[in-house]
Amino acid sequence: MTSDVIAPAAVSAQEREALAEAIRDLVARRADSASARAAMRATPRIDRGLWQTLCAEIGVSALPIPEDAGGAGASFAETAAVLEELGRSLSPVPVFATALATAAILISGDDEAIAGLLPPIASGERIATVCWAGRDGWDRPGVHADGGLLSGTADYVIDGESADLLLVLAGSGDGTTLHAVDADADGVTVTPLPVVDPSRPLARIDFDEAPAGTIASGPDLPGRLRTHARALLAAEQVGGAAAALDLTVDYTKSRKQFGRIIGSFQALKHRMADMYASVETARSISRAAVSAIVTGDPAADDLAAAAHVYCSEAFARVAGEGIQLHGGIGITAEHDIQLYFKRAHGSAQLFGQPHEVIAELSRRLLA
């Protein structure tokens, strides 16, 4: 086993911004609202064309993967920049799920798994996701391992219906262990779930004595993976909040009431200024959390938890204000602002709800 702290290639802030602009341009050309909505209704719920383009032209799945495993040798800071842009469009592509699976493999430090599993992920040939949560959430896996066989149910699996490779956190006599299994393996049943947020496909995956490879990992894997998950999700939430703000500003520039553009009303200007402040402060804490992970800062866990709480609440607040400032049209299925409202509240349920994370941080302080 080796450490997952692999020195990434130096990427400047200017290069990272150029990457974000490339994603923004690609999404503008290939993933408008109509195509995103069509993908949300597809089976499976994925914009496969956009996913393949993102992997082939920009290499999004390869970014945090070391060069000797077929990757770009960058870092999760670049992945976060991609997720922030994709959070703006709500395009159903499995970038977040695959990044989390990549993090699980890297954190394990298992050289054989890194060499065998990461190259097809880096190329985009395989879509990977993490099976982690039990029915009650992410504190206790819903799957158990016994003699190399997996049994039980993983709930809330992100992009589970389109994944080829499943990274499974399972309870065992040794605590929590990590396993790799093909999604079409014997004993694996994938059930797409109905969701309030159509832009975030979730699945339930049942394992009935499914044979799986065991990936050597340490006892700190679940905690470190949760830190990555919260920080990367926060970046995506910032993008969603920024898009909700942009939609609201654009709407208030065109909507007239009492013979005036409603964006000229002082009260609405103040509300949108508060929304802008929420987005920018969320962006700051999100980037601080991601930076702490990349640099190995001991405060990464606390920063990621704080980012999860703040960005979840900021996104929900901005999307909620956006709904109100749009008026009646904001609650119709035809307008995109309601999609951001659903994404905001759905994302806040992942990896611990904000009030649960606050309680977790409080227990740490009192310990």
Image (tube, rainbow, N blue to C red):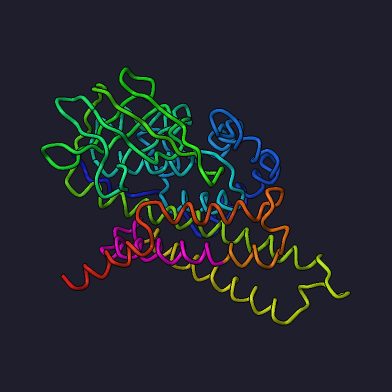
For this rendering, which residue is in front, 307 or 150?
A: 150
Which residues are drawn in magenta?
292-317
x and y, in percent, of residue 62 in the image: 45, 38
Q: Is residue 253 visible?
A: yes
In the picture as drawn, the residue positioned furthest to the bottom comes out as 266
x and y, in percent, of residue 365 in the image: 22, 72
For this rendering, which residue is in front, 44 or 330?
A: 330
Magenta span main SS = helix
Looking at the image, residue 196 sits to the left or right of residue 219; the answer is: right
- Residue 308's place in the image compared with 219, above or below, is below
Residue 290 included in the magenta stretch of the image: no
Total number of numbered discs in the rendering: 0
Q: Which residue: 78% across, 73% down?
A: 262
For this rendering, which residue is in front, 26 or 210?
A: 210
In the picture as drawn, the residue positioned furthest to the top comes out as 186
For this rendering, which residue is in front, 286 or 315?
A: 315
Image quarter in which the C terminus is found: bottom left
